[in-house]
Image (cartoon, rainbow, N blue to C red):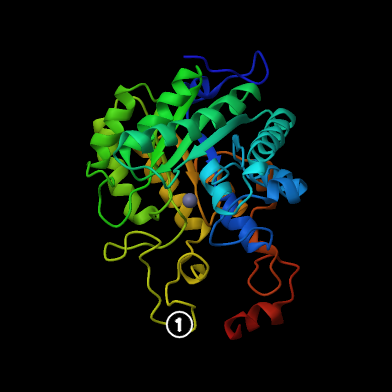
């Protein structure tokens, strides 16, 4: 298996995983939607062409916070999504543009450049659909290979069979792969497999890293990761969404908000999830728990912010550049302990 490093003597993904944990920030779609440059609904990353500088900037922010992978922003940038919005002519420039942006940030920062393919939403268990899905993956993987990316992330697959098609496309191009499944409310794939069994099959088919991303928050993803870890010999990935999912509402789509009656349609997903957001300490706790299971490919998906990635990195004992600005409450005007602070303000802290 080729594991192309962008700089000849730099360690590639598999070298880095052999040595320890690799952090990969995801969640570009949600973050750029929040910032007002991407439309919720179709969720197509046209921002790559419309505001490439914002994509470059967000890559840099995540790297600054500790991400060691720059994931090209081609999530939902595939042919089916561009057909849906009537812009198939943008398919190739969008993909090539996103790859170029990610590769440039990886090069300047000494991180890994990853191509990205994802759920097509047209997979069905018939020959015609399989052919169409595979064609979507093949054209994107060809652009990824031409861009010289270090490896390919195939993510958010609800069907194990669709993940297998993605893996086959990546392997046929001779590239290393991280394949992650999306598990919704029921703890199984959409084709009815236990996630551990599905991951074992993907590993057996040659995926370099297998695991889960998106959909479930730390609390409802970790138990599944434990079973995957037990079923797989190779590397395992865990990239939850940063939301407080529960046993009763285990996916972020299933969350309900009894404290709010003004959400259009009534469902917090995807644009009213704010009150469910995990704090940075919960993300750190997840990182420690996953690392203790020897889960070596870690990240945060939809909803992630740089502060969460920094928290994850620090939980693993690292100090990314952003750690220079990690909290130091000792000099807070009211809550601090610094001897030069005004005693009256510190005494008043109880009134805050
Ligand atoms: Zn996600």
Secondary structure of the residue carrying tag 1 is loop
346 over 107 or under it: above or below: below
Front residue of 17/313: it is: 17
Q: In the shown orientation, is residue 188 left or right of residue 315? A: left
Residue 229 location, x and y as percent?
Answer: 29, 35
Front residue of 96/56: it is: 96
Q: State which quadrant residue 319 falls in.
A: top right
**Looking at the image, can residue 327 be seen?**
no
Residue at x-position 54% and y-position 39%: 24
**Looking at the image, can residue 248 be seen?**
yes
Tally the marks. Answer: 1
Residue 217 location, x and y as percent?
Answer: 40, 56
Badge 1 is on which residue?
260
Residue 288 location, x and y as percent?
Answer: 42, 44
Mark 1, Cα crowd under 10 Å, few <14 / some 14-19 / many 20+, is few
Residue 83 location, x and y as percent?
Answer: 56, 48
Residue at x-position 71% and y-position 28%: 107
Residue at x-position 36% and y-position 59%: 251
Q: Is mark 1 within 8 Å of ligand 1?
A: no
Front residue of 352/80: it is: 80
Q: In the shown orientation, is residue 243 left or right of residue 54? A: left
Q: State which quadrant residue 305 falls in.
A: bottom right
Front residue of 125/109: it is: 125
Q: In the shown orientation, is residue 96 left or right of residue 162? A: right
Q: In the shown orientation, is residue 298 left or right of residue 227? A: right
Residue at x-position 68% and y-position 63%: 36
């Amino acid at each position: 298996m080729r594991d192309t490093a962008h700089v000849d003597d730099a360690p590639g993904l598999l070298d880095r995983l052999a040595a320890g944990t690799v952090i990969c920030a995801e969640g570009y779609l949600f973050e750029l939607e929040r910032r007002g440059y991407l439309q919720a609904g179709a969720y197509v990353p046209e921002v790559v062409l419309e505001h490439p500088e914002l994509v470059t900037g967000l890559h840099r922010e995540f790297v600054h916070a500790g991400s060691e992978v720059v994931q090209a922003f081609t999530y939902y940038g595939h042919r089916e999504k561009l057909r849906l919005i009537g812009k198939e002519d943008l398919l190739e420039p969008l993909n090539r543009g996103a790859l170029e942006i990610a590769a440039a940030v990886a090069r300047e920062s000494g991180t890994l450049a990853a191509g990205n393919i994802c759920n097509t939403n047209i997979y069905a268990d018939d020959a015609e659909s399989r052919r169409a899905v595979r064609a979507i993956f093949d054209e994107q993987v060809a652009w990824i290979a031409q861009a010289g990316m270090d490896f390919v992330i195939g993510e958010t697959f609800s069907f194990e069979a669709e993940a297998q098609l993605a893996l086959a496309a990546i392997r046929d191009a001779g590239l290393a792969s991280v394949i992650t499944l999306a598990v919704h409310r029921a703890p199984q794939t959409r084709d009815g497999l236990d996630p551990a069994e599905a991951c074992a099959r993907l590993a057996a088919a040659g995926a370099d890293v297998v695991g889960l991303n998106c959909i479930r928050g730390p609390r409802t993803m970790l138990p599944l990761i434990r079973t995957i870890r037990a079923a797989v010999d190779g590397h395992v990935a865990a990239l939850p969404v940063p939301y407080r999912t529960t046993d009763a509402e285990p996916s972020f789509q299933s969350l309900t908000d009894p404290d709010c009656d003004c959400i259009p349609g009534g469902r917090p997903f995807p644009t009213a999830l704010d009150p469910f957001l995990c704090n940075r300490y919960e993300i750190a706790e997840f990182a420690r728990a996953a690392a203790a299971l020897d889960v070596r490919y870690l990240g945060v998906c939809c909803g992630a912010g740089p502060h969460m990635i920094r928290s994850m990195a620090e939980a693993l004992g690292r100090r990314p550049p952003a750690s220079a600005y990690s909290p130091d409450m000792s000099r807070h005007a009211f809550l601090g302990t610094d001897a030069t602070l005004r005693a009256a303000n510190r005494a008043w802290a109880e009134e805050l």
